[in-house]
Amino acid sequence: MFCKHTLDAGFAQFVSILQWVCWKRGVYFGKVNKDYTSQVCPQCDTHTGKKELKERLYQCPECGYTTHRDVAAAQVIRFSRIV
């Protein structure tokens, strides 16, 4: 239990340092909400529902867009609003 709290604090400190370094160098830094990224189609924004982890191919039933699941999630994050 203590180890998880230490890990969470360490990651928060890492993000804080990364944000400062980006600011210092004039590089954009933004946090993105990662929730539901593998459940939204990057082409038509249709919510396609939860999938099993073993499903590696993303297929949208609405527009027919097909790609690797991780690529689709990255595309959703890339075009999402910053939190």
Image (cartoon, rainbow, N blue to C red):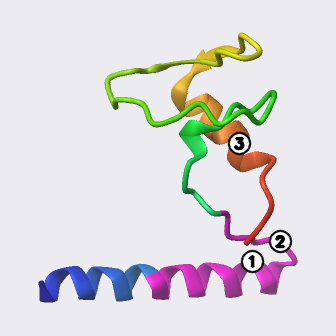
Earlier sequence position, callout 2 versus callout 1: 1
Q: Marks 2 and 3, Cα distance to the nearest angstrom?
A: 22 Å
Residue 71 pos. (x, y %): 61, 30
Q: Say which amino acid is labelled 1.
A: Cys
Instruction: Give the spatial CA distance, label 2 vs label 1.
Output: 5 Å
**In the rendered image, which residue does mark 2 sit on?**
27
Image disc number at residue 76:
3
Mark 3 vs 1, N-terminal side: 1
Question: Which disc, if any, is residue 22?
Answer: 1
Relative horizontal placement of residue 83, taking residue 67 as reference (left or right): right
Task: Estimate the spatial distance between the alpha carbons at disc 3 and disc 1, rounded to whole Å.
Answer: 23 Å
Amino acid type at image mark 2: Val
Q: Can you say which quadrant of the picture contains the C terminus? A: bottom right
76 is higher (above) or lower (below) than 28: above
Please indicate whether residue 64 sits to the left or right of residue 38 in the image.
right
Name the mark nearer the viewer: 2 or 3: 3
Mark with earlier residue (2, 3): 2
Give the mark toward the camera: 3 or 1.
3
Which residue appears at 72% of the width and 17% of the height? 62
